[in-house]
Amino acid sequence: MDTTKETKQDKRIYTLSQEAPAKAVVKLGVPLIMGMMIMVLYNLVDTYFIGLMHDDYQLAAVNLAYPTMMISIAISNMVGTGAASLIARSFGAGNKEKACHTLTVGFTLTVLNSLLVTVIGIALLPQIVTGLGAKANTFEYTSQYTFIILLGSIFTMGNYTFGQLLRAEGSAKYSIIGMVLGTVVNIILDPVFIFVLGMEIRGAAIATILGNAAGMVASILLYASGKSLLKPSAKYILPTKEILREIFWVGVPATLETLLTSVAYIINNNLAVGYGELTVAAMGVAQKILSLGNYIYQGFAAGTQPLMGYNYGAKNYKRMLSILKSGVMVVSSVELCVMAIFGIFAPNLISLFTQSPDVIATGAKVLRTIMCILPFVGAISMSRTSFQAMGKPQFAFTITAVRQLFLYMPMLWLLNHLFGFNGMIWAQPVTEVIMMVVSVTLLYKVISWFERKV
């Protein structure tokens, strides 16, 4: 191995093991946030160009179909989160061979899972579209978009999972290359397919899939070039029972978490349809704009995951507590600034995607309400991913189960029943305030318990 490569590897290990906690969180989190901000354009670009057609039903259909993408990501999250957690812990324990074996198994499982999603999804397409909440004016548009997204599941799932596996070894900068390339491809192709070729909403879906394909190929080429610390190998293609058990032990709860989020999203859309299909369009635009803030806390949480996993493997619990405190302070401060921007410019932001006065007014109202989650939800996400990194998915899943099943979903129904539309959109902010206290307290106590045992 040449000296330059050794130096780069040493720097990555130093960041995981010794860098000042706040600096390490920012160092691993900010590149991911930049990449994720670009990934936001996957959703915003489709919404923007479809909005230029001045057809609010197609705008609503993109929002209705979005859970299809979320479910694909949920299933890929099973492999990505489970394998990434095991890779980081194996690195921390000094077992590089096990990390390489886990990486290869992650590649294989991603391909198999994506084929299952495509076959089953297309076979059940009419039932899926109905379940998503599509009605007469949006059913055909939602079907067209959903079909193409299902057909390209291997690219969506591969792009997402391979990026997670790169982050697990501390290669945050390399992991965003696929995100950036994929988004650039999507931005270029969207107007071509939607307007030049006249494919409308189908063109938006095709551009999204081709963008994900470009991102997935970029990640594969990075592994093949030898720039990553790990490399998949044919000799590791067959999994051991231990590796499968470890991946699924962490990964299945992570998948259930994302699936529960998808179910909550579908319930939210079905309730919104009761106020008119254009209300779905307004909520969809507001949620896509909010995703700019969401990707900030998700980036910090994803950056924290390898830090927590490595130091858990090394039994450095004191450093884990410092990372937790620093991470929560950093992400909450940043999100307060984002929240202020959304509050001031909400109508202007919504009007970028539609000219309908009703959609703009409703969308601005929704955005100014749901943005209140931002100072709280980052700490929840950081706590959840930390438990996954530690190989303690039961705690991560408990946070999500309580959050979605016992708080958010019941509150959606209850507040909608009691206060109508206003109550429905306030359900999430109320949920996140409660869950921030619960999740951070739980993580702090678990880490403190391990520290006392040393």
Image (cartoon, grey):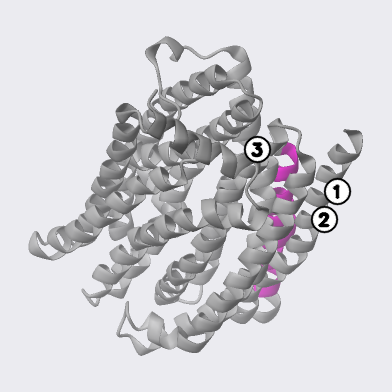
Give residue 63's quadrant in the image.
Answer: bottom left
Instruction: Give the answer, above or below, for where 12 lies relative to 101.
Output: below
The one nearer the camera, 429 or 451, is: 451
Name the amino acid, label 2.
Answer: Thr
Q: Are marks 1 and 2 in contact (CB under 8 Å)?
A: yes
Give the crowd class for mark 2: few <14, some 14-19, many >=20 residues within 10 Å. Answer: few
Name the amino acid, label 1.
Answer: Lys
Badge nearest the viewer, 1 or 3: 3
Residue 122 percent across, percent down from the top left: 34, 38
Name the amino acid, label 3.
Answer: Gly
Residue linked to disc 3: 309
Q: How many marks?
A: 3
Residue 360 percent across, percent down from the top left: 40, 85
Residue 180 percent across, percent down from the top left: 32, 53
Asked if one can make out residue 228 in the rendered structure from this viewpoint, the answer is no
Question: Sequence-wise, which precedes: disc 1 or disc 3?
Answer: 3
Is residue 81 within the magenta segment?
no
Provide the secondary structure element on which disc 1 rests. Answer: helix
